[in-house]
Amino acid sequence: MAEMVRKQIYIEERHERLLKRISKARGVSEAELIRQAIERETIGGKPFLLAPDQAAWDEILRFVKNRKSLRPSGRPYRWNRLDAYEEREKRILRRTKG
């Protein structure tokens, strides 16, 4: 590893919050995030990618399989503007009751 040089910098409070959140999510230090950003900026390195979330993919696959099982009637859907208002009204009523 190359010799490290200590630097003190000033960042905005919102950057501080973002830095902490990303650092925790990726499991790396805040300093490492800053070093990665400098590398990307200066040599065009690839951004750090999070590992795929298997649970999220499983949920997507379940959703797709469920949608496939609904089997459309074969006729095109005739959109009715009133349907959109009914759905919106139902959501609003659920929110006001809860």
Image: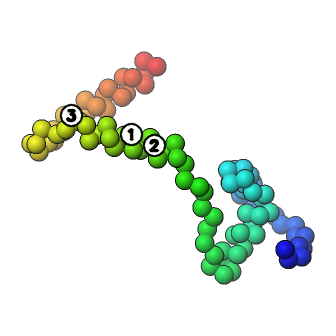
- Looking at numbered disc 2 in the image, what kind of residue is underneath it? Asp
The answer to whether the residue labelled 1 contacts the one labelled 2, judged by CB atoms less than 8 Å apart, is yes
Q: Residues within 10 Å of mark 1 (few under 14, many from 20)?
A: few
Please state the horizontal and vertical placement of residue 50, each as a whole percent of the image. Answer: 60, 57
Residue at (43, 25) in percent of width and height: 95
Which residue lies most toward the bottom here?
43
Q: Secondary structure at mark 2?
A: helix
Q: Nearer the viewer, residue 56 or 22?
A: 56
Please state the horizontal and vertical placement of residue 5, each as a whole percent of the image. Answer: 90, 74
- The image shows residue 32, relative to residue 46, as above or below, that is above
- The image shows residue 8, relative to residue 94, as above or below, that is below
Q: Nearer the viewer, residue 80 or 22?
A: 22
Q: How is the image coloured?
A: rainbow
What whole-number distance in Å separates the C-alpha atoms at marks 3 and 1?
Answer: 27 Å
- Looking at numbered disc 1 in the image, what kind of residue is underneath it? Arg
| In this rendering, position of residue 77 left or right of residue 41 | left
Question: What residue is shown with label 3?
Answer: 83
Front of the two marks 3 and 2: 2
Front of the two marks 3 and 1: 1
Q: Secondary structure at mark 3?
A: helix
Please state the horizontal and vertical placement of residue 38, each as a whole percent of the image. Answer: 72, 74
| In this rendering, position of residue 34 left or right of residue 44 | right
Residue at (72, 53) in percent of width and height: 27
Q: Secondary structure at mark 1?
A: helix
- Looking at numbered disc 3 in the image, what kind of residue is underneath it? Asp
Which residue lies most toward the top here?
97
The answer to whether the residue labelled 3 contacts the one labelled 1, judged by CB atoms less than 8 Å apart, is no
Please state the horizontal and vertical placement of residue 55, each as a whole percent of the image. Answer: 52, 42
Give the label on residue 31, or none: none
Question: What residue is shown with label 1?
Answer: 62
- Mark toward the start of the polypeptide (3 vs 2): 2
Question: What residue is shown with label 2?
Answer: 58
